[in-house]
Amino acid sequence: MTNLKYRLLTIVLLVLASVWALYPRTVVERVKRDGVFVFDTIQRVPLKRGLDLVGGMHLTLEIDESKGAVANKSEALDRALTVVRSRIDEFGVAEPVVQKIGNDRIAVELPGIDDPDRATAVVQKAAWLQFQITDKTQAFERNVARFDGILRDKGIVAAAKSDSGKGAAKPALPNLFAAGDTGKKAAGDSSAADSIKSSNGPFATKVGKAPGSDPGMFMVAESDRDEIDAYLQHPDIQAAIPPGKQIKWGADTIMAGNVAYRGLYVLDARPIITGDYLTDAKPNTVPGEGTIVEFQLNNEGGRRFKSETGKHVRDYMAIVLDDRVMSAPVIQSAIGTRGQITMGGSGLQAAQDLALVLRAGALPVPLIVADRRTIGASLGQDSIDKSIRAGVVAIVAVVLIMLVYYRGSGVMAVAGLVLYVLYTLAVLAGFGATLTLPGLAGFVLGIGIAVDANVLIFERIREELDHGKSVRTAIDEGFKHAMTAIIDTNVSTALTALVLYQYGTGPVKGFAVTLLAGLAATLVACVFSVRTFYLVWLNRNRGVESLSI
Amino acid sequence: MLRILHGTNIDFIKYWRTAAVLTVAFIFVGIGSALFKGGFPLSIEFTGGTLMQLEFTTAPDVSKLRSTLDAAGIRGAEITTFGSSRDFTIRAQEPEQVAAQAAGAEKVATQIEAALRAAYGEGAFKVGRVESVGPRVGAELARGAVYAILISFAVTLAYLAWRFEWRFGLSAVLATAHDILTTIAFIKLLHLEISLTVIAAILTVIGYSLNDTIIIFDRVRENLHKNRKMPFYDLLNLSVNETLPRSILTHATTLAATISLLLLAGEVIRPFAWVMSFGIFTGTFSSVYVASPILMWVENKYPRANEARGTTRPKP
């Protein structure tokens, strides 16, 4: 009798604990609405839903080693992780997950994101800001003939003739080098201009100079860009670039006539300052200039910036972001702690995003997307609805089967099943497990499997009754003998679930977790509780002769 | 008391030859089809590639869809409808597309979306789901899946060896191997795509089929102690017959769950539900017709030394 009391007490406590674990509670969520962070207070059941159910984006990033190996990957990744995390925090997503996987990956989960490309760009942007003075020594002009010569000698350009022919066919080319030569900017070195004219390789014919443009700034038709870029990447050309100089592309294209041109800048390799000194960045719209990002440097950065720009008054300073020249304004006077980056054609949102990544800091290593999954929110809700429908149908079917077949004992099994559903969900909520679509499928499947324990027990009780045992003994023996099989089956399924948990990714992990939670719930709900129900029933009906089973 | 197949005395083991021929034929057809008709369709999780699920506002022409993709340089993409004629799944997992994703997994998806927007206009379709997997991640997941299957196999073997004696363990493991083979054959014959979820289903089938085998073997173990004089052949039959009502009922409830998943839970979970439904069938089959005859064969070959049991079975 006391034994029975403890059993009942245990069940009551477990049910209370489960109800408490599942009771809808108030959660404060930080969400971004109309570009502003707001705190939302909502009531909901504390079951975490995976990305495939709420919609959103999963992103795995790894270190991009295509442009050179990274020495200490794990440590570099840790620093990248901090940067990514602070960027995501500012981007404004409810319950984001940013974590390191192994030694070379970062996983980012952003529930409810609606513009995956933008979010990816924000996470992935290196945001490596540099200020470099454009070249004043005509380093490129003087070397064009040499570059073209290298291309010819190495056989990279097979037939210079056809190349120059193609180049000459472009109607817009005359306003390039030839025009630049006669322009006032080309006054410096006439021999350099001569050498350009005399050479007819791709550099001479396809890289031009607009009249009146900044020193060190050239123009390449957008259609020739890939070709010229391939030449520039060539190791022999790289080696021929004068020491202390760098060649970088502009970020935007400029329309001249009907042809889009992209800037090609020759820069002093040493940056006068980098984005490391940046303390704040804000987007802004200025009439006449369009969208800009204003930034502020810290005191040390400001001092250095001031002294460097002071030395370079009237020179042109290229603002280089991720190896692309954003703009190259002339330095009117020494600049202190404040500056700005003009965004060219891109809009306010791009400026907002740039300001955000600049504030969060540069990525210490380049990252590439190793895999990306996005799920629309409506699709996730659809999955939930469908799973619930399947679950309800499964429960109804199982309940009917048990009631029709086992009658009175079936009622106990159904009561056990109700507890099973409650316990499983409570365990999932209690451990903060994430519910995924395969997880929901596992849950529905679990309903079918959970009653197996009861079926085993009931069949055993029937056998014992057939052997002429009394009801009380039959129930005792039934539970006792069925136990070994129940334990064995549960353990073997649990082992499989553990392996799945270890090797599965997100959704499959969710499946393994529901399976495990279900197994634990089976033992408590379908074995322990149903046994207690029998004991209560036996207690009420002493000397009972028959059992409805 | 409602009873199904109670107190039966069916000679299940007698039909083991027929059963063996049938199951081996099934496995051969399935695996043979995989060998000669181009392997298994693997999901992009394993091969790398891009999967996009799109919902158009009006049903588009599939050939135009294909030519749009071809023009955008996405050749050989698989375009399938599901649910309605407005819902499409595009799978780009040709080697060149996978290679393009080494430089950033999202590239191909962005390319496809841009091409479709240009061809069909803004708002003509909604992107429901996009999965882009780079080649390295794909290869790692594939390796992980193989490890998962092998390790769960080894772990269950170890558990069985510990719980039962080796004769039972060996038979159960061979029966499980049979289940994996028939399930794989089934997957091939139904042209299901092997994804991580399907692998999870296969592993669950392994667990489920082991349950069945364990329950019969548990009864065999018990009967071995009870009926010391009974020939093993009869003892096996007795055990299968005794556990028959339980098998029928459990499979009814589990099938009720998997069939409602199959019919109601939607496209994404359907392959999982198919594999589970088949697995319940093959698991039951193998417990009776694979595990039991093998156990009998092992008992004949390596009889228990201390027991005077008639191990010879009557010729079927």
Image (cartoon, rainbow, N blue to C red):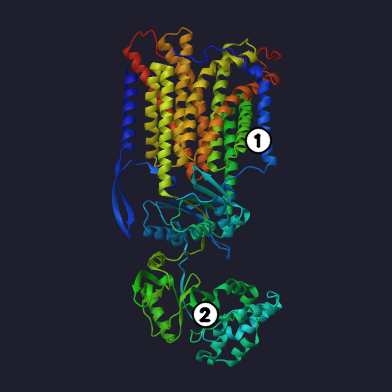
Whole-percent x, y for residue B291 in the image: 62, 24
| Labelled disc at residue B274 | none
Other residues around mark 1 within 10 Å, as few (<14) / some (14–19) / many (≥20):
many
Q: Secondary structure at mark 2?
A: strand
Q: Quadrant of the C terminus of chain B?
A: top right
The type of residue carrying mark 1 is Gly
The type of residue carrying mark 2 is Leu
Q: Nearer the viewer, residue B100 or B76?
A: B76
**Residue tagged 2:** A267
- Relative to residue A145, is residue B148 depicted above or below? above
**Residue tagged 1:** B30
Q: Give me the chain letter of mark 2.
A: A
| Residue A323 in sight | yes
Whole-percent x, y for residue A39 in the image: 29, 53
Q: Are marks 1 and 2 on the same chain?
A: no
On screen, residue A79 versus residue A25, left or right, reads right
Q: Secondary structure at mark 1?
A: helix
